[in-house]
Amino acid sequence: MKHRSLLWALTPLVVLALLLSACAPATTEAPPAATEAPATEAPAATEAPATEAPAATEAPAAACEGDYVLVPKNLGNPYFDTANDGAQEAAGELGITVLYQGSSTADATEQIALLNSWIAQQPCGLAISANDADALVPTGQAAMDAGIPVITWDSGIAIEGRNLLINQAVSQDIGAIQIQMASDLAGADGGQIAVLSATSTAPNQNGWIEVMKEELKKPEYSKLELVEVVYGDDDDTKSYNEAQALFTKYPDLKVIIAPTTVGIAAAARAVTDADLIGKVFVTGLGTPNQMREYVKSGAAPQFALWNPADLGYLAVYAMHALATGEIKGEVGETFDAGKLGEKTIEDDPDLGLNVLLGLPFIWDKDNIDDSNW
Ligand code: RAM
């Protein structure tokens, strides 16, 4: 039986406000609609600042004539397709061309080969969701040495291999929210939980799993037992098979946390096919259209995510700001991010130079029909 605490009976926004620390950034008002522009007070892109005319000696922002490239972990994933929708919206506003180019599997070696071929073509900028933080450092450095701005978004290359990270949400919040949802689904008696992740080298998932393990040390989670972390490689079939293997290996399993949109949908389908709805619950990070039927059936009653379209949109604005010299990529610099308003480059001992998108959201049966992406 799903245990629904008072906390979860509140609206997603209130839940987040309670869950997340006081230092969490300002929230928006509803689960994000991929096409909806949040109300911001950003100046229009064409609006000239009244008093700050460029000094006569200052070179005007240089336009780059070539293409910009948005690189997902792999192709064929609706999460990245939605990010590309946002990237294309930004490209249209900026009057630039953004090509969406990826490898067929979420594999660092394939991704490096693709990136090397792009570096040789000297694009205006690269925006990469990395399959490995360290393996991609020499590639990122080669691009930067060639004068190509390197943005990582969604999943970062290590600090020395890129100019900026576009961070979807605070990692601590993303990890904590998933343990909170798993605890709620397991109920007061707790029980066995497992993590079904993406690839074993995925920088973003590995960071969140570290946070989850720390969260599980808290007294309120003492009845949750993490039995195993398995990897579905962001491949639907492998993720489905890994979920099935967990049912066999752990007959008392209560919750699968899948911090990947591919894994969570595959795990929810596996629970459904195995007739385990109500016995094994799935939660984690998913996209509303992929998860709708499982939220309604009870296979995956609640899950979280940010808006991938906004993430792709922000990545393109940041890449363009670097390519045109609007920013150099230094802490404290601000740039215009269109409908998202003015964004600031922050520094962090773990993340390095980064730009934060916002907060994660939670979907459940009460709001799953509010989002169509
Ligand atoms: C998958 C990918 C992506 C991750 C989401 C949550 O689509 O692994 O990198 O951010 O899940």
Image: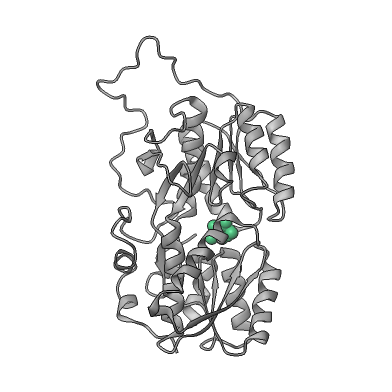
Q: Nearer the viewer, residue 108 or 362?
A: 108
Is residue 298 visible in the rendered image? The answer is no
How many labels sit on residues?
0
Residue 350: percent from left, percent from top: 48, 50
Ligand 1: image quarter? bottom right
Is residue 341 visible in the rendered image? The answer is yes
**Residue 291 in the image: above or below residue 225:** above
Q: Nearer the viewer, residue 118 or 186?
A: 186
Q: Nearer the viewer, residue 87 or 161?
A: 161
**Residue 365 in the image: above or below residue 361:** below
Residue at the image position 49 percent from the left and 53 percent from the top: 308
**Residue 82 in the image: above or below residue 152:** below
Q: How is the image coloured?
A: one colour
Residue 291: percent from left, percent from top: 52, 70
Residue 183: percent from left, percent from top: 43, 79
Q: Is residue 140 left or right of residue 117?
A: left
Residue at the image position 58 percent from the left and 24 percent from the top: 65
Residue at the image position 51 percent from the left and 46 percent from the top: 312
Residue at the image position 51 percent from the left and 88 percent from the top: 278
Quadrant (top left, top right, bottom left, bottom right) of the N terminus: bottom left
Image quarter of residue 363: bottom left
As drawn, the residue found furthest toward the left would be: 51
Q: Is residue 294 left or right of residue 231?
A: left
Residue 336: percent from left, percent from top: 38, 35
